Image (cartoon, grey):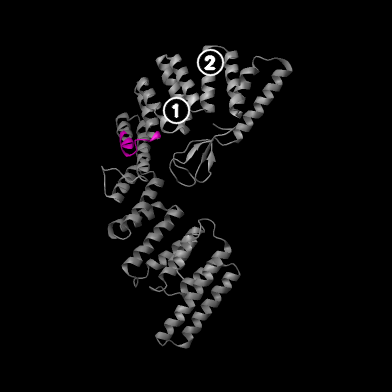
Amino acid sequence: MNFRRFAARLPENELSDLTFFIFIFAAIAIGWYLGRKSGKKKGAKNNQHQALAQSYAQGLNYLLSERHNDAIEKFIDALEVSSATFETHLALGNLLRKRGEHDQAIRVHQNLLARPSLNRISQQKAQLELARDYIAAGWLDRAERLLQELVETSSELRSTSLEYLVEVYRDEREWAKAIHAVNLLHGRRFKRLPEEWAPIQAHFCCELAEEAINGKDYLSARKHIDAALGYDRQSVRANLLMGRLEYLLGRPQEAIKVLERVPKQSPDYIPEILELLITCYEALGDESGLEAYLARLLKEHPSNSVLIALTERIHQQQSEADAAAFIGKQLAMRPSLRGLGHFLNLHVDSTQGRARENLFLLKNLIDQLIASRPHYRCNNCGFSGNQLHWLCPSCKRWDSVRSVKGIEGE
């Protein structure tokens, strides 16, 4: 049985104690069998066989008493590292890593690396798995050194090592190094990247652009944004940053042109453009243009954020009664808690006595309900929160976190 493939098929973070027990039991049994077989071939004495049998029995006893660490120690001691047992050692280390037992996984893979009898390919495989252990444990500097060495010395594992190196640079926020590693991965710098990597490269460039904008280095920011759009013409994040940059440079009209591309690219990100879009229209003094654009957005891509923004414009430009009538009509067609909360807010100040108290109480209850619901959710792993993350903090996937839709959300 190929235990390495067996361990690889096991789902992450779903390794039961029974699965672990079976695997370690089988590994110790294999160690005893191979050692006994090896001893016969070499004419070993009976006391060697007895020592192996004793190690097997002790390892089994440790498992039965749930002393997993001691069982692993006994496994390492009893099972000789050779070409015949290498895959079993490797699979055990991977299984421990999946269980979150990083120190034990590191020990198993370090034990493999300490064996000069292994051939070059086996040594490099063990080094790659040790680097993965370090990544899982958060020791990124150690993982980086091992992976860089593999990139330089192993043609067989170069691509895999570069992929993990990109992961390390991402977690270290070394964006320029991440870009370089992806370019090395595909052996190209100026040609178009494969579909799965181009958006990721665009995000790396956007991270550099954000750092430049925050440092008021607008020339570098534009260069990084252009690079992001070069990798991915449909990058919503790059256009959001370009709109922000144009506004900071005192060009609100240009900022509006850029921001108005976003709904065509991905309506899910409309809430992210509204605040800056309104600011730009106000800087131009174009209230009618703003109201017309919001009305078109609401018709083409209905959302609570647009509804509330347009209701506020009607309130400011016309009257409270007109705004209340407008949002009431919209809520009849598309009910939502956020919209209802804003509707009640328009009526609270215009009522008196007990009616006002009841409206105010109802408004507070709705606000509490809305506050208890996440505004954003990852459509890959289900992570939720009240802040937009371009990289999901849980599953580490780019562009998977979107605004929540439905009666409570957008």
Q: Which span of residues is magenta-colored?
A: 226-236
Left or right side of 261 for 320: right
Left or right side of 371 for 147: left
At horizontal 37% and vertical 26% (from top left) the residue drawn is: 258
Task: Please tell me whether mark 1 sits on a helix, a strand or a loop.
Answer: helix
x and y percentages locating residue 247 in the rendered image: 37, 23
Left or right side of 273 for 316: right
Task: Please tell me whether mark 2 sits on a helix, a strand or a loop.
Answer: helix
**Residue annotated with mark 1:** 273
The mark lying in front, picked from 1 and 2, is 2
Q: Is residue 109 above or below residue 183?
A: below
**Residue annotated with mark 2:** 314
Q: Quadrant of residue 211?
A: top left
Q: Earlier in the sequence, mark 1 or mark 2?
A: 1
Q: Is residue 298 above or below residue 52?
A: above
Mark-to-mark CA distance, 1 and 2:
19 Å
Residue 376 in view of the camera: yes
Out of 361 and 233, give the one closest to the viewer: 233
Instruction: Tell me which amino acid carries mark 2.
Output: Ile
Q: Quadrant of the C terminus?
A: top right
x and y percentages locating residue 321 in the rendered image: 60, 13
- Label for residue 59? none
x and y percentages locating residue 237 in the rendered image: 40, 34
